[in-house]
Amino acid sequence: MRSAQSPFQRGVRRLLRNRVAMASAWMLLLFFAAAGAAPFVAPYHYDDERRDLSYHPPTRIHLVDAQGRWHAPFVYSSAITYNQYRQRIFTEDTARRFPLRLFSGGHLVGVEEPARLYLLGADARGRDLLSRIIYGGRVSLSIGVIGVLVSFSIGLLVGGLAGYFGGRVDDALMRMCEMIMMVPGFYLLLALRAAFPPEMSSVQVYLLIVCIMAFIGWAGLARVIRGMTISLRERDFITAARAAGRSHLGIICSHLLPNTASYAIIAATLSVPGYILGESALSLLGLGIQDPHASWGNLLSDAMGIVQVQFHPWILWPGAVICITVMAYNFLGDGLRDAFDPRLEVTRR
């Protein structure tokens, strides 16, 4: 006879059976791993440029040379010609092959100069777009996780204090939350960012964006946690903790907030895309991470001109990566909610 499983174990089993959520989790894990190992995974440094190869199209990898002979994967160097409209045309110089080399120059894969490995094409300054996307993931992915950790820590604590104490403490904290929620988040984000000097370094801008997004993101969670805490504060285990002499803060942190963890984890997963999109929008408008440092938002700045998109469509790849990441977080959040929501557990029974 099998032993009875805990609600957490049943939730994990349901999550593992959800193929869409698990595929999303593996996709996000792959993105985080690539961003964490960017100097090794990326073919080039994010600021390694070749101005003569501006907007180079994606490099073709060959197995058969011009004479029809088979070889290990290789590429050709590029030659530039001009058409009748004086537009640059990149052609392959088939006189020499450049084999792909694993673990070349401290990178996972590379080729010998003068050939370049532009798997997703190059940007306006001849920098490898794939490398910049990988490096940009360090900013765009981490800013979502760190921002959610900061804002949810504030929201959990404020909501727990309001729900536990009630009365004037509850009124004061909830009115503060409502004041923050009244202001449209994106416009508040723009106003706060524009209030700081433009000559700040990228590290300072990064920390500033995290602080701003955390500041505007905690109020909604605090109201939900406050309602959950009100329903929990009169339970027997809270009364027993008071009788045992536990401090108010100890009761909130050790007994009340852990009982809201399932909701908080799901809400945090669903909130991360908002932080990624907020940073991307700021960088796209020139208020976030600035060139030459890479983030997914400022990589899309080249795509703001319809002419560039028409002639160089590969510059839209950062937008595709943002879309995939946001969808993966949403699918994973939905999977976590379906697996661990106690109300759904009752419905299934």
Image: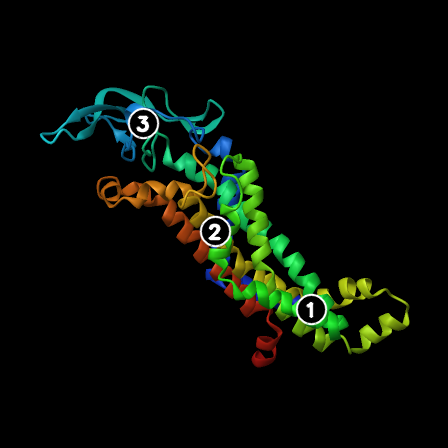
Looking at numbered disc 3 in the image, what kind of residue is underneath it? Phe
Q: Is residue 202 above or below residue 154?
A: above
Residue 47 appears anywhere in the view = yes
CB contact under 8 Å: marks 3 and 1: no
Looking at numbered disc 1 in the image, what kind of residue is underneath it? Ala
Dot 1 or dot 2, earlier in sequence: 1
- Residue at the spot 87% in from the left edge and 65% down from the top edge: 246
Mark sitting on residue 116: none
Give the x, y percent position of residue 149: 62, 53
The residue at which mark 3 appears reads as 74
If the image is split into quadrants, where does the C terminus sit? bottom right
Q: Is residue 311 above or below residue 225?
A: above
- Apparent side of residue 232 relative to residue 56 in the rendered image (left or right): right
Q: Residues within 10 Å of mark 1 (few under 14, many from 20)?
A: few
If the image is split into quadrants, where does the N terminus sit? bottom right
**Label 3's element?**
strand
Mark sitting on residue 190: 2
Dot 2 or dot 3, earlier in sequence: 3
